Amino acid sequence: RLVLAVLVLSWLGGRGGGVDSRVESSPAALGVAAAHLHLGLRQSVRVDGPGAEESYVASLRAAPGVAAAHFSLGVVRGRRGDETGAEESYLAAVRADPGVAAAHFNLGVLQSKRGGEAGSEKSSLAAVRAEPGRAAAHLSLGVVQRKRGDEPGAEESDLAAVRAEPGVA
């Protein structure tokens, strides 16, 4: 849970907020959205799913283009078993900020779980492109490749994971 909070907060800091520039939001609205997002992250760490979900929805009402709020809402929805809602949230996060590897990664894992191998491979590739130094993205891509019988591609993805993070893969 703490990892989720750190991931989202570092993502916000490293990506300049992950805000969709096509969605108009005033600085005040972004401030309100950030406050709700912060509250939701604190509730997620405490495993208060309903409270966190309510905070993320409030964040999105204030500023609909905040990718971190869409991503975090997807995590909460996925935890409570709402795979359709989680998928919608991850897709919204990717639309808001196509460079968000975590949203592509979670979307790919969810799609694979639901049997959507073509979508899963596309999402896993997007995660690798967005963050090539992340071993988990390469490993996820390898799983999808292996499922469809591409053993050479899967082996290359496994090797890429080791090169990306030798101590993790």
Image: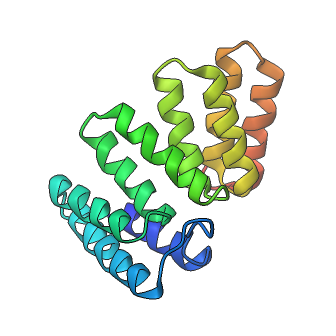
Q: Does 18 sit left or right of 27 as displayed? A: right
Residue 15 or residue 157, whichever sits in front: 15
Q: Which colour style is shown?
A: rainbow
Q: Position of residue 151 (x, y in %)?
A: 77, 19
- Write the residue at 47% across / 24% down: 113
- Write the residue at 34% across / 71% down: 37
How many numbered marks does the figure carry?
Answer: 0
Residue 156 or residue 147, whichever sits in front: 147
Residue 15 or residue 96, whichever sits in front: 96
Q: Position of residue 145 (x, y in %)?
A: 71, 23
> In the rendered image, which quarter is residue 31 located in?
bottom left
Q: Is residue 88 above or below residue 54?
A: above
Q: Is residue 85 above or below residue 51?
A: above
Q: Does 39 sit left or right of 122 as displayed? A: left
Residue lying furthest top: 149
- Write the residue at 64% across / 45% down: 137
Q: Does 43 sit left or right of 19 as displayed? A: left
Quadrant in which the N terminus is drawn: bottom left
- Write the residue at 33% across / 64% down: 61
Q: Does 136 sit left or right of 33 as displayed? A: right
Q: Is residue 24 above or below residue 96?
A: below
Q: Position of residue 96 (x, y in %)?
A: 57, 59
> In the rendered image, which quarter is residue 126 located in?
top right
